[in-house]
Amino acid sequence: MNQLEFESRHEAEWSRLAGALDAKKAAAGEAADTARVPALFRRLAAELAIARDRQYRTSLIDRLHALVVSAHFAVHGARLGRKGGLVQDLLRFFLRDFPAEVRRQWRFVAVAALAFGVPFVGLAIALQWFPDFVYYIVAPDTLSRVQAMYSNDAMRFGAERGADTDIKMFGFYIFNNVRIDLQCLAGGIFFGLGTLAVLLSNGIFLGAIGGHLTQAGLGRNFWGFVVGHSAPELVGMALASAAGLMIGYALVAPGRKTRAAALRERARPAAVLLYGAALMTACAAVIEAFWSSRVDLPFELKLGVGALVAALTFAFLALGGRGRGP
């Protein structure tokens, strides 16, 4: 392709980019084109490289170079020059983009929630009629330690860790919750089966613990401990698991794409869910360490706070980011 053909083919988009940049500076009525500046900028940078490689005349190269510099400052300079830009971006992500992505990926989130919730609830209920069945699932020494953690004379509920301060407990909870979330995510590499295995095993184990303690007369201590932080913690686990299931689904059913292309397509929404899961996990660890473990609070108060936390969590995911522009 000679220079005249090159200019003729791309002149319209160069003019469109120049017009969009002028509209950006003047804040005029061409807002529709300003949204295309990043895409036009990327194409222009490639075209400038082609012009230099083919040694087109200097005047054309200088023109394209000047346009690239203007587009660069329009795309990147505005963000850097904005006061509180990083804070605003983080708030926009967590308050708008994150809950909207959760709603878009609700099928994966629902599968993850059911894979954990069904064995958890089912086993906790079944053990009220068949209490001895717990010994097929949990070792007797483990049950003894768990009973000591939720006994009426415990210093802190759930505190069989050698941690004597709330800060140490917070660190333990962060480590434990993040470990489980990462297992749920990494299990997606095994075509999603690893993620389902982690969810099922955790649901069975925790259901067995909850059912056993309830049947042993320590239900108020256990459920009072769990209820305050369960919503953000379990939502965080479900979101990390949904990200793992998305990876697994891309490997199992890539459609007409290659598996690599399907994974790239799923990568961004999976990352959004994972970042949101990290936020939920951190919130749950704070509540778990500084509120749930306290033994001096009445069960009814913990139950009410837990219901409030759950309502706020699900309202945020259901309503966050609605009614806003792109």
Image (spheres, rainbow, N blue to C red):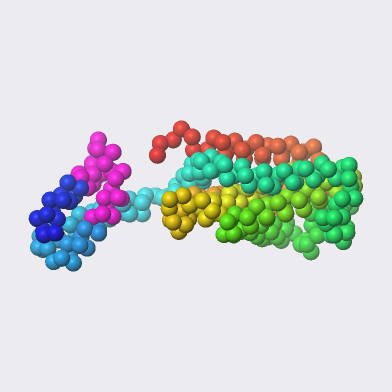
Q: Which residues are magenta?
A: 15-44
- The stretch drawn in magenta includes residue 31: yes
Percent position of residue 70, x then y? 23, 54
| Quadrant assignment, res 318 | top right
Residue 325 visible, this orientation: yes
What secondary structure characterizes most of the magenta part? Answer: helix
Tell whether 311 sits left or right of 106. right
* Front-most of residues 233 and 198: 198
Residue at horizontal 68%, vertical 52%?
Answer: 199
Residue at horizontal 13%, vertical 66%?
Answer: 55
Residue at horizontal 63%, vertical 57%?
Answer: 194
| Quadrant assignment, res 31 | top left
Tell whether 232 sits left or right of 210. left
Residue extending furthest toward the top = 323
Which quarter of the figure is the N terminus placed in? Answer: bottom left
- The stretch drawn in magenta includes residue 11: no
* Front-most of residues 150 and 126: 126
Percent position of residue 61, x then y? 15, 61
Tell whether 96 sits left or right of 169. left
| Quadrant assignment, res 182 | bottom right
